[in-house]
């Protein structure tokens, strides 16, 4: 029995007259039922109809359990919309009956309506990658034009709503990406690129030979760091206070707080290293970086060569990844969480900083 029904039963026992309570719940985490009837499907009298094309779109519902708004999409049998923009005519809200005006709202990965600042994910709407939006804290409406938020005046595009004012800083190292001479060379092309950045010209054959002349049970990243330090900093293993490349292993089987601290440390090191034009090496899964192109968990070593920082809070929003295997001009922007997740997916969950 649902909470509303239990409450009604208690009140009846107390002699209090009650009206029929609405029994609501989710099923399968995506379908909304009221009094046993799925909502938002075609024919639902509460659905809105597109004023231009004349077809049913779905409806918005409020879930008291979460205190959030959701959109039920009629085209998908009433399933809640996730990671989706929705055009909502004002007529649906009885603000101006017959009006063709409305607002753009957005629902996040769990279907909850977004309110406040939002950074677009390239995997959802590629044309919005790197753009920032603001959604009204009360109505969820996308902001357009000029608006003052927390005492700061911002300018948003009048058409698609993305932030226009100069609140972003980009830093990208101009690095020649050298493709692998043999696909099994792993981190060797990235090592060759960084050595070249520091005026050390080495062939990939020379680098891989030197890496595997090192004795001991070392990982490929540890061998790479030794070669980098030998030619850039004149010592294979730097002391605690010496400049040089170091390997940082990641612990992915840990709690949320520890993952957060690892993320913070990674961001701090990127900011510091890129100021001195020293790229950071990462192991990154190809399926995570190029969704749809790679299905297995194969990965390769790439270089963090830049970032996009939000000057309003001084935090990194995107990293720029240079992939040696696809050439000099290809720089792929990825989010911080995406990068850390993709790095951690691989057997050697680590980076060289």
Image (tube, rainbow, N blue to C red):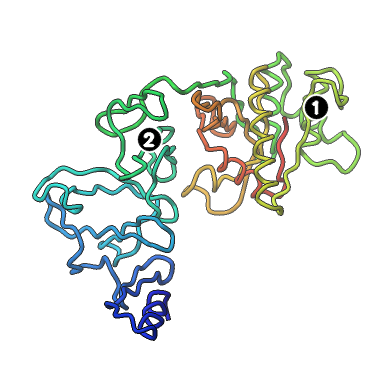
Q: Which residue is drawn at 35% across and 68% down?
A: 32
> In the shown orientation, is residue 266 left or right of residue 104?
right
| Residue occupying the far right of the picture | 215
Q: 138 or 100: which is nearer to us?
A: 138
Q: Quadrant of the N terminus?
A: bottom left
Q: 37 or 168: which is nearer to us?
A: 37
Q: What is the x, y in percent for residue 119? A: 44, 37
Q: What element carries label 2?
A: strand
Q: What is the x, y in percent for residue 160? A: 28, 34
Q: 31 or 295: which is nearer to us?
A: 31
Q: How many marks?
A: 2
Q: Is mark 1 on a helix, strand or loop?
A: helix
Q: Do the residues labelled 2 and 1 touch (CB within 8 Å)?
A: no
Q: Which of marks 2 and 1 is nearer the N terminus?
A: 2
**How would you rate the neighbour count of disc 1 (Cα within 10 Å): few for under 14, some for 14-19, many for 20 or more?**
many
Report, in whole angstroms, how far the alpha carbon at label 2 lies from the one at label 1.
44 Å
Asked which quadrant contains residue 279, the reply is top right
Q: What is the x, y in percent for residue 209? A: 81, 31
| Residue occupying the far top of the picture | 199
In this rendering, is residue 264 above or below 242? below
| Residue occupying the far bottom of the picture | 13
> In the shown orientation, is residue 82 left or right of residue 315?
left
Residue 133, labelled with which disc? 2
Which residue does the numbered mark 1 point to in the structure image?
227
Q: Residue at x 31, y 73 (%)?
A: 22
Q: In which quarter of the image is the C terminus?
A: top right
Q: 282 or 42: which is nearer to us?
A: 42
């Amino acid at each position: 029995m649902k909470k509303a029904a239990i409450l009604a039963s208690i009140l009846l026992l107390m002699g209090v007259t009650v009206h029929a309570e609405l029994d609501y719940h989710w099923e399968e985490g995506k379908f909304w039922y009221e009094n046993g009837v799925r909502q938002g499907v075609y024919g639902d009298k509460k659905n809105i109809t597109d004023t231009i094309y004349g077809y049913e779109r779905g409806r918005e519902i409020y879930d008291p359990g979460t205190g959030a708004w959701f959109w039920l999409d009629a085209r998908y049998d009433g399933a809640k919309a996730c990671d989706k923009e929705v055009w909502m005519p004002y007529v649906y809200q009885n603000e101006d009956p017959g009006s063709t005006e409305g607002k753009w709202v957005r629902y996040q990965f769990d279907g909850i309506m977004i309110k406040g600042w939002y950074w677009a994910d390239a995997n959802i709407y590629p044309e919005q990658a790197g753009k920032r939006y603001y959604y009204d804290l009360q109505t969820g409406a996308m902001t357009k034009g000029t608006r003052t938020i927390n005492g700061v005046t911002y300018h948003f595009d009048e058409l698609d709503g993305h932030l226009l004012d100069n609140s972003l800083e980009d830093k990208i190292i101009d690095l020649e990406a050298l493709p692998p001479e043999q696909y099994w060379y792993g981190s060797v092309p990235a090592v060759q690129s960084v050595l070249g950045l520091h005026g050390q010209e080495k062939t990939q054959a020379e680098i891989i030979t030197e890496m595997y002349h090192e004795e001991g049970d070392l990982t490929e990243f540890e061998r790479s760091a030794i070669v980098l330090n030998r030619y850039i900093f004149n010592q294979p293993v730097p002391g605690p206070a010496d400049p040089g490349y170091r390997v940082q292993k990641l612990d992915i089987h840990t709690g949320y707080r520890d993952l957060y601290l690892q993320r913070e440390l990674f961001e701090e090191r990127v900011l510091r290293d890129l100021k001195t034009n020293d790229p950071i090496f990462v192991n990154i899964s190809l399926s995570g970086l190029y969704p749809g192109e790679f299905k297995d968990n194969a990965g390769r070593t790439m270089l963090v060569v830049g970032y996009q920082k939000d000057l309003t809070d001084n935090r990194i929003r995107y990293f720029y990844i240079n992939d040696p295997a696809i050439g000099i001009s290809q720089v792929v922007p990825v989010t911080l969480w995406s990068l850390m997740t993709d790095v951690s997916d691989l057997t050697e969950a680590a980076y060289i900083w």
